[in-house]
């Protein structure tokens, strides 16, 4: 198993693109044989638009907003929680 830090810049770039195109970190880790814990933080850093209510400006969680326990998108905005 490889760590994120073992990858070349072009490999990282490719993975970041796949991640942005909708693949999840666990999927990529499994597919490429990379330690998930080693890539989670760098990938997250590259994906600031993700709906996680993280370090973005004005991103505070408003009261009453619920997030999907599976993918952390707002409830109703993802396939796990979509109401018809
Ligand atoms: Zn979801």
Image (spheres, helix red, strand yellow):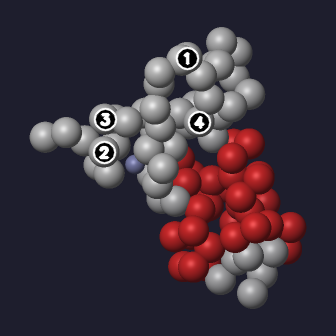
Quarter residue 12 falls in: bottom right
The structure residue drawn at horizontal position 55% and vertical position 17%, both measured from the top left corner, is 62
> The residue tagged with tag 2: helix, strand or loop?
loop
Does residue 66 appear anywhere in the picture? yes
> The residue tagged with tag 4: helix, strand or loop?
loop
Residues at marks 4 and 3 touching, judged by CB atoms closer than 8 Å: no
Other-residue count near label 2 (Cα within 10 Å), few / some / many at <14 / 14–19 / ≥20: some
Where residue 14 appears, as percent x and y from the top left, is 61, 60
Other-residue count near label 4 (Cα within 10 Å), few / some / many at <14 / 14–19 / ≥20: some
Q: Is residue 42 above or below residue 33?
A: above
Q: Does label 2 or label 4 sit earlier along the sequence?
A: 4
Q: How many angstroms separate mark 1 from mark 4 (CA)?
A: 12 Å
Q: How many angstroms separate mark 3 from mark 1 (CA)?
A: 16 Å
Q: Is mark 4 within 8 Å of ligand 1?
A: no
Q: Nearer the viewer, mark 1 or mark 4?
A: 1
Where residue 49 appears, as percent x and y from the top left, is 58, 31
Q: How many angstroms separate mark 3 from mark 2 (CA)?
A: 5 Å
Q: Which mark is residue 52?
A: 4
Q: Is mark 2 within 8 Å of ligand 1?
A: yes
Other-residue count near label 1 (Cα within 10 Å), few / some / many at <14 / 14–19 / ≥20: few
């Amino acid at each position: 198993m490889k760590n994120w830090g073992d990858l070349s810049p072009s490999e990282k770039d490719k993975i970041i693109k796949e991640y942005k195109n909708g693949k999840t970190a666990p999927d990529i880790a499994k597919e490429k044989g990379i330690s998930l814990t080693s890539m989670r933080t760098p990938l997250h850093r590259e994906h600031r638009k993700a709906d996680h209510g993280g370090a973005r400006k004005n991103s505070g969680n408003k009261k009453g907003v619920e997030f999907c326990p599976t993918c952390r998108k707002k409830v109703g905005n993802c396939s796990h929680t979509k109401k018809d």
